[in-house]
Image (cartoon, helix red, strand yellow):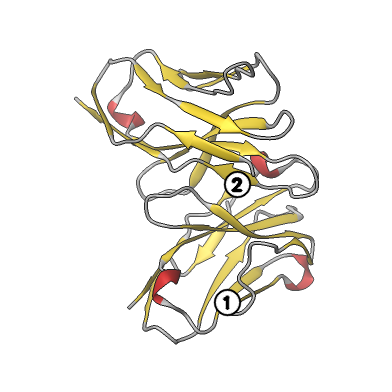
Amino acid sequence: EAGVVQSPRYKIIEKKQPVAFWCNPISGHNTLYWYRQNLGQGPELLIRYENEEAVDDSQLPKDRFSAERLKGVDSTLKIQPAELGDSAVYLCASSFQGQGAGMAFFGQGTRLTVV
Amino acid sequence: GDSVTQMEGPVTLSEEAFLTINCTYTATGYPSLFWYVQYPGEGLQLLLKATKADDKGSNKGFEATYRKETTSFHLEKGSVQVSDSAVYFCALRTQGGSEKLVFGKGTKLTVNP
């Protein structure tokens, strides 16, 4: 069974440019999470979806970040414009609804470098 | 708010040595506690968990006991192997409406043959 798939694995962009990350969760998983992991830190939640609804986006910097999960399956996280401080690993995770955040499966992440 | 404090790394051990990675937490109520592992080039994987006080989670020779009185969830393994080299994250699951994991900073373990 395929796990959580993220692309690209690596991305280098200049500041002020836009960037997008894509996540394909495990089949049947209703809940999808985006986390950001800064260097030397643990992951921090950006947004959580239940199906296509964003039920917790309180930690998403809405001035430059946006996310969508059309049809309740794949999700895209976008940054526009990117800043130097956005350099981090962006992790996507998914779980069955009701299983809870602790039972989520994580993708390998997208490592973003903003120069 | 809820938080997790983990032992600073990196930790370097010889094969077959005893491992302890300390983890303490601050939270309202009684959160579920987790240890995640991140092997080089791979995603985060759940290693073990405990959902209530005095529960012991175990997997692959690793153990951790949920200690409410000391708000701790220390990870231990009696005899580490080279293949255990990875970054280990302690985490708690928040309660209430905001369903998420709160992670510690991670501890990098290197096991030498």
Residue A45, placed above or below residue B64: below
Tag 2 secondary structure: strand
| Residue A78, horizontal then vertical, whole percent | 57, 77
Closer to us: A30 or B13: B13
What chain letter is assigned to the residue under label 2? A
Dot 2 surroundings within 10 Å: few (below 14), some, or many (20 or more)?
A: many
Closer to us: A4 or B52: B52
Residue at mark 2 = A105
At 69% from the left and 32% from the top, the residue drawn is B31
Residue at mark 1 = A78
Q: In screen coordinates, is B77 left or right of B16?
A: right
Q: Earlier in the sequence, mark 2 or mark 1?
A: 1
> In which quadrant is the C terminus of chain A drawn?
bottom left
Tag 1 secondary structure: strand
What chain letter is assigned to the residue under label 1? A
**Badge nearest the viewer, 2 or 1:** 1
At 37% from the left and 50% from the top, the residue drawn is A40
| Residue B92, horizontal then vertical, whole percent | 61, 36
| Residue B41, horizontal then vertical, whole percent | 37, 50
Report the Cα–Cα distance between label 2 and label 1. Answer: 21 Å
| Residue A110, horizontal then vertical, whole percent | 46, 64
**For the image shown, how many numbered marks are present on the structure?**
2
Residue found at the far left of this picture: B113
Q: In screen coordinates, is A23 left or right of A108?
A: right
At 54% from the left and 83% from the top, the residue drawn is A80
Report the amino acid beneath label 1: Lys
Closer to us: B69 or A66: B69
